[in-house]
Image (spheres, grey):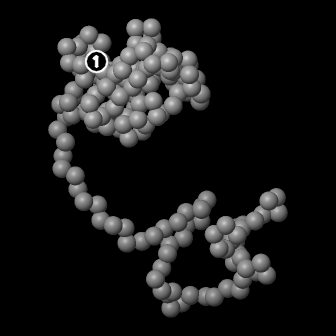
Amino acid sequence: MAVTIKDAIRATVSDPKTSTDSNIQNAYQIARLIRNAFAHDPTLPVWSIDADCQNKKFSVPNIISLDTTSINGTEFDWRHYGGPLALFNLCRFVRVEILKDKLSPRKNVPVPQKIVYQQGNLILQKVDELPPNVKFVESLPDGKISLGDGHFLCAAGELKTDET
């Protein structure tokens, strides 16, 4: 998301680092610095704060903030900027305030009527009552019910394999 935010700002604002709008400057710097943390090793991100951005606070009010004081060279931590929701809100800010995209009204999503569980390639649906043509099966001596293909039904937390 940080790469997309940074690129969207650059595509819209010719020089976001020197923009007269502090929100644009700060949004750009935050996105850029988050992106930089992942640039050298996405599996183990480390803050790589440019000298001109060290020991500064970047903020888009009520959206996201990043205090770069003493984090250069340290392990990336989402708590430094507020985490995934803050980054999502920054995406929304860029979309609406910088790209000038119009938001459509939210639609109410109905509450799901079915409860479905998936475990591997097995899909189970919770039912209120058994269908009339149901066939009952015997449980194994340990209380599990074999479903075939290595799948078993048992109480939560009770399934143990030979290896455990």
Snapshot quadrant of residue 163: bottom right
- Does residue 102 appear in this view? yes
Q: Nearer the viewer, residue 13 or 29?
A: 29
Q: Which residue is rendered at x = 42% and y = 15% of the image? A: 55
Q: Name the spot of residue 96 as percent of width and height, x first.
A: 21, 34
Question: Can you see residue 7?
Answer: no
Residue that lies at the very extreme toward the right in this rendered image: 162
**Residue at numbered disc 1:** 25
The residue sitting at the bottom extreme is 132
Q: Residue 41: where, in percent of width, then height?
A: 58, 23
- Pick the front one: 76 or 163: 76
Residue 11 location, quadrant? top left
Query: Identity of the amino acid at label 1?
Result: Gln
Residue drawn at the location 26% of the way across and 30% of the way down = 61
- Residue nearest the observer in this picture, 94 or 77: 77
Could you tell me which residue is drawn at 65 percent across and 74 percent down? 155
At mark 1, the secondary structure is: helix
Please indicate whether residue 97 sits to the left or right of residue 50 in the image.
left
Residue 10 is situated, as x and y percent measured from the top left of the image, at 30, 18
Q: Where residue 130 sits: x, y (%)?
A: 51, 86
Q: Is residue 113 left or right of residue 76?
A: left
Query: Viewer-proximal residue, 124 or 61?
Result: 61
Dot 1 alpha-carbon crowd within 10 angstroms: few under 14, some 14 to 19, many 20 or more: many
Up-down relation of residue 36 to residue 121 (above or below):
above
Image height of 67 relative to 137, above or below: above
